[in-house]
Every structure is written in C-alpha cells, then in structure tokens.
Amino acid sequence: MSIFWFITTLLLLHFCTPGVGMDHGIVGGKMSIPHSRPYMVYIRDKQTYSACGGFLLREDFVMTAAHCNRKHLMVYLGVNDTNDLPEGIEVDAIPHPSFANKPGDDIMLLKLKTPAILNKTVNIIALPKTNREEISSNCMAMGWGRLKYNEKSPSSVLREVNLTLLDSENCARPHTICTKEDAGPAGGDSGGPLICGNEAVGIVSYYITNEFTSYLTMYTKISHYLPWINETMNPTL
C-alpha cells in the first residue's frame, strides 16, 4: 500500500463507538430532511465500528467504495440518526477485481443476504445508463462524516452539501470525477454517492489538500464501470 493512499484512505474513514456522534457532518453542509434520501445506506463493521456510506441500487445490492471493505460489514437501511439504527443486514462484499489499495477502481458492490423492502424511507437511486451520458455540473454529496476535515467526531445525522464539478481536464486521474471547494465530504463519508440530477454518478473516494487549504475531492466515475456492475448484479446462468 502506498503512503499516499494510506493517508488519504484514513482521511475518509472514521472509527467510533456506538452512540457517539455530533449533530454535524459533511463539511459546509446542512442537515438533510429526515428520510428525504431513502437510497442512503449506513455501513459499519460490527467488530471495529469503522463506518462508511453507501447507496441502494436494487433490493439486493448496495454500492460503496472498495476501500471500505472489512471482514464483518453490516448495512443499515432507512437511517437518519445513527444513534437509532434499525436491525443490520449482513452482506457479501464484491470489490472491483482491479482494486489494489491505491487510487483507482475504488468501487464495490455489497450483496444483501436479506433483500430490502422498498418503501418511503428505503428506496433505490438510478445510475447513468451509458458512459457517454452528459453529467450535470450541479451536484450533491451526503453522509454521516465529520463537520470539519481535521475533527474526528462523526455526525449522528445525515447531512448534505451542494457541489460544482471541475472540468474533466482539471481532474487528476482517469475514470474520476472531481470537486475542489472548501466544502464537501470528509472523514466517514467514503462510499457515499455524488448525485447529479437524479442519478448517482460518483462514489466518494478520497481527497487531497494543499498549502492554501483547498480540497480536491475524488469520486469514482460510476459510468466507466457499468459493464462490471451489470455483470455482477445480473450474472449469466
């Protein structure tokens, strides 16, 4: 594992004990209206309590970042406040086969061992239909992460923030979408979606900063992985 990837991965994961939280989250964001984002999924290792975000694609599949993979993952659906979690669902983790604990291919599917029941508080989000689909520059990220980049306490409630995409030529890596602002995802927000229009177009992966304290946040570009996603979710018999 490279030193760079180790550092940036730590920045987007958080470790906490049950019930610990603050009424804050996404840096520069606001509290989401409770259950207004029914596709959001809270993901946590039941032994270490390391936590990530994710989003529901189908009754039996959640998408998140591959660097969120742990041995004892549980997913929690229909969550607003993590101090009041429903019963968790066990999953089988399927990280992208090319992911290697460094930037790139940071995408994972979680197959639910007990399918979700869709309703007003638990529902799915659409993905892009093709890799050539134009992406709206006005987007949103959300999660239960930190209020400030350098603080360790996660939010207990879901928060969200509006973001504007960088032009693709200003994004550092291929198959990646970027934002560069003083607001956005922080520790604990890994794996959550970047929503543009009504689709999940990216997955929160990592961020880097410079001496001017501007944050370049990287999101895995979901449309590049559509063939793998379709093959994994709909295997041929």
Image: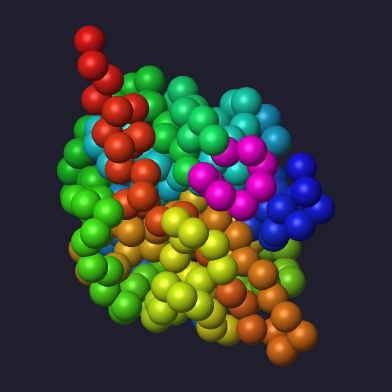
| Residue at figure coordinates x 30%, y 37% from the top left | 227
Image quarter of the C terminus: top left
**Percent from the top left, x then y, of residue 101?**
66, 42
Compared with 23, 1 (above or below) is: above
Give the total of numbered labels: 0
Give 173 or 236, whichever is nearer the viewer.
173
Q: Is residue 52 visible?
A: no
Residue 89, quarter of picture: top left
Image position of 61 (left or right of 199): right
State which region is magenta: 99-106
Q: Is residue 184 visible?
A: yes
**Percent from the top left, x then y, of residue 9?**
68, 53
Compared with 54, 166 (above or below) is: below
| Magenta portion: prevailing SS class | loop
| Residue at figure coordinates x 56%, y 49% from the top left | 104
**Percent from the top left, x then y, of residue 206?**
60, 60
Tell which residue pokes out farthest to the top in this image: 237
| Residue at figure coordinates x 36%, y 50% from the top left | 224
